[in-house]
């Protein structure tokens, strides 16, 4: 994981204004993607310690947390790049925790990986094409639709992916994932290393993607961005979920405590964040 | 020796001879090398059995065209017919060897694929020795083997022209496959970033097996051209491999047209050496040219942008 330039949660602007209303109480039966007690290991090193998570159809969920909190590991576990017990991850009720990484795209699970990871010997258009080449999933996304969403990619379709600016490369990476017409789009740090104005352009596409019926998970270190875009937020700390709730229901102090674990050193925010998080759940963050 | 060198350098017709014969033998080297280049480019696998696969293909083609000849078909057509029969067989063999054996050797460590392909090389040489004996063989192409086109002061063998045309077609075909087809996109994507390629729904083992199948079709083509142009025995594989390696490295790893250029540089150098200094200098001239290019351009004549 690379260092973030500005890790301090700066919540002076009121993120709650970005949302008109909290998302309707989610039904667990409607969860398109969920994990129960998800653990993940790199060899002997344990990176996730029992993560419970769910994403409902049509929802945008943000995962925030400091470097090393396990956010990217979590996404890798979802797509099969890190193997788990099969029933730790469910997609549409199907256990997928142990699936091969090449199987996700056919189910409708697509990842925009951290660092963009474009194929260097492929042009912009080829990078997009390969995203949809191995699935017969029908849906709204095609080359034309991607070029409508990001017109600059149409102009540069025959350039090598590596020749584009960072923001444009990020657009290609998002477009590549959309080409499979996913039901769930997982975005890992799509704002990393980009200028604020570029980040705004990238995030401007989220409502359009969502309007096509895709549920979205964004992993984000920029807390304001995460709160502005998401229906619900999970905060990760040291491989555990330290806080969850709707942006409207979370206070700056709660997030700060859950993000850094400042409340009690060593004990991940037991009193403040956790008790309030439970309260948040009761308040309608999670209806089940 | 100086006299001999000057008599070659100062004589335009002898220089033209070097060019013609160098290009035709270089085209053959490029055919040897194309499959090797393909495999290395996609999966970073150094196939030490590549030369022996070429000899295996030559024997298979020899056997098929012998049968066709015995059936009374014209020998001028038999090599081509044999190739059409052998190509799918060798594709299947390549696919099976990759899926069954070589895929299991690929990983972070580069040693296992080297050891396993070296073992395959030994098995193939001795297997061919057992089945076909150490006698040299040649694929009969009837009147084609001696046919030539008169260009005034000499004949250019039809087989040499065919080899050059075949090499151009093979390299052009592979180039098309790589850069104009969906399978080619998969090949390049897997080579660029295997982890992310899997997330695109690409089964890496399947792509590797397909690419080995394609490489074996190229090996079949190389085998028929080699077997028709000259004679072969079970132990010629390693020297074919050496020429192929040199052609790939001269041209620049990963560049198919570079591989063709590398083969031709090698062929012309050998022809020049053999005519200017004597037949015994033929092979060493190729190696010296290879070393000089390695010294001046360590990444080859047409290096790919990355790695």
Image: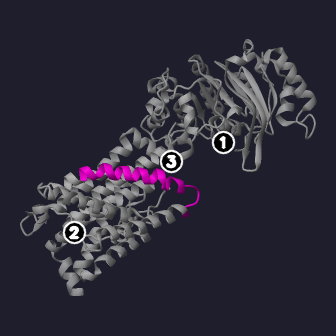
The quadrant of the picture occupied by the C terminus of chain A is top right
Is mark 3 in CB contact (under 8 Å) with mark 2? no
On the image, the x and y values in percent for residue A98 come to: 64, 38
Q: How is the image coloured?
A: one colour
Considering the numbered disc 3 on the image, is that residue within a helix, a strand or a loop? helix
Q: Nearer the viewer, residue B184 or A233?
A: B184
The quadrant of the picture occupied by the N terminus of chain A is top right
Q: Quadrant of residue A198?
A: top right
Circle 3 is placed at which residue position? B192
Q: Earlier in the sequence, mark 3 or mark 2?
A: 3
Q: CA distance from mark 3 to mark 2?
A: 39 Å
Circle 1 is placed at which residue position? A82
Circle 2 is placed at which residue position? B230
On the image, the x and y values in percent for residue A124 come to: 47, 36
Circles 2 and 1 on the same subunit: no
Which residue range is magenta in the image? B83-111
Question: Is residue B100 covered in magenta?
Answer: yes
Q: CA distance from mark 2 to mark 1?
A: 53 Å
Q: Quadrant of residue A125?
A: top left
Is mark 1 in CB contact (under 8 Å) with mark 3? no
Left or right, A184 with respect to A239, comes to left
Disc 1 crowd, CA 10 A, few/some/many (<14, 14-19, 20+): some
Disc 2 crowd, CA 10 A, few/some/many (<14, 14-19, 20+): few
């Amino acid at each position: 994981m690379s260092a973030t330039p500005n890790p301090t949660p700066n919540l002076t602007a009121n993120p709650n204004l970005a949302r008109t209303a909290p998302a309707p109480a989610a039904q667990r039966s409607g969860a398109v993607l969920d994990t129960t007690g998800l653990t993940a290991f790199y060899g002997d090193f344990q990176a996730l310690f029992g993560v419970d998570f769910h994403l409902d159809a049509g929802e945008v969920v943000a995962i925030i947390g400091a470097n090393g909190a396990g956010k990217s590991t979590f996404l890798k576990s979802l797509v099969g790049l890190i193997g788990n017990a099969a029933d730790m991850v469910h997609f549409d009720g199907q256990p997928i925790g142990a699936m091969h990484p090449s199987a996700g795209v056919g189910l409708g699970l697509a990842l925009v990986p951290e660092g963009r990871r474009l194929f260097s010997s492929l042009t912009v258009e080829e990078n997009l094409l390969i995203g949809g080449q191995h699935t017969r999933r029908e849906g709204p996304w095609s080359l034309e639709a991607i070029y409508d969403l990001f017109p600059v990619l149409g102009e540069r379709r025959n350039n090598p992916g590596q020749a584009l600016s960072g923001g444009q490369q990020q657009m290609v990476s998002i477009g590549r994932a959309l080409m499979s017409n996913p039901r769930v789009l997982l975005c890992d740090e799509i704002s990393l290393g980009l200028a604020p104005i570029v980040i705004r352009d990238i995030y401007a596409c989220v409502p359009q993607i969502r309007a096509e019926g895709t549920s979205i998970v964004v992993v984000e270190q920029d807390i304001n961005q995460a709160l502005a875009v998401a229906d619900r937020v999970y905060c990760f700390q040291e491989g555990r979920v330290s806080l969850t709730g709707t942006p409207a229901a979370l206070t700056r102090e709660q997030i700060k405590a859950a993000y850094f674990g400042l409340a009690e050193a060593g004990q991940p925010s037991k009193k403040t964040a956790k008790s309030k998080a439970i309260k948040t759940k009761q308040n309608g963050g999670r209806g089940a | 020796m100086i006299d001999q060198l000057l008599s070659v350098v100062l004589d335009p017709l002898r220089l033209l001879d070097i060019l013609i014969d160098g290009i035709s033998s270089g085209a053959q080297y490029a055919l040897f090398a194309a499959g090797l280049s393909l495999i290395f480019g996609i999966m970073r696998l150094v196939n030490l059995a590549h030369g022996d696969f070429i000899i295996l293909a030559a024997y298979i083609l020899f056997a098929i065209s012998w049968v066709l000849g015995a059936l009374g078909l014209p020998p001028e057509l038999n090599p081509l017919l044999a190739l059409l029969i052998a190509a799918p067989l060798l594709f299947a063999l390549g696919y099976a060897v990759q899926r069954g054996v070589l895929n299991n050797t690929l990983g972070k460590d580069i040693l296992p694929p080297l050891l396993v392909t070296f073992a395959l090389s030994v098995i193939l040489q001795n297997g061919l020795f057992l089945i076909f004996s150490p006698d040299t063989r040649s694929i009969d192409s009837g009147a084609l083997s001696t046919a030539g086109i008169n260009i005034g002061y000499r004949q250019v063998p039809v087989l040499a022209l065919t080899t050059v045309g075949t090499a151009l077609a093979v390299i052009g075909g592979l180039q098309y496959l790589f850069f104009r087809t969906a399978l080619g996109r998969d090949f390049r994507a897997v080579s660029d970033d295997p982890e992310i390629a899997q997330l695109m729904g690409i089964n890496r083992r399947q792509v590797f097996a397909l690419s080995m199948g394609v490489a074996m079709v190229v090996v079949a083509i190389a085998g028929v051209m080699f077997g028709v142009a000259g004679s072969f025995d079970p132990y010629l594989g390693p020297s074919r491999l050496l020429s192929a390696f040199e052609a790939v490295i001269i041209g620049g790893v990963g560049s198919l047209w570079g591989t063709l250029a590398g083969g031709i540089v090698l062929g012309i150098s050998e022809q020049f050496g053999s005519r200017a200094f004597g037949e015994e200098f033929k092979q060493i001239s190729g190696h010296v040219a290879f070393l000089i290019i390695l010294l001046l351009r360590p990444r080859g004549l047409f290096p790919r942008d990355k790695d």
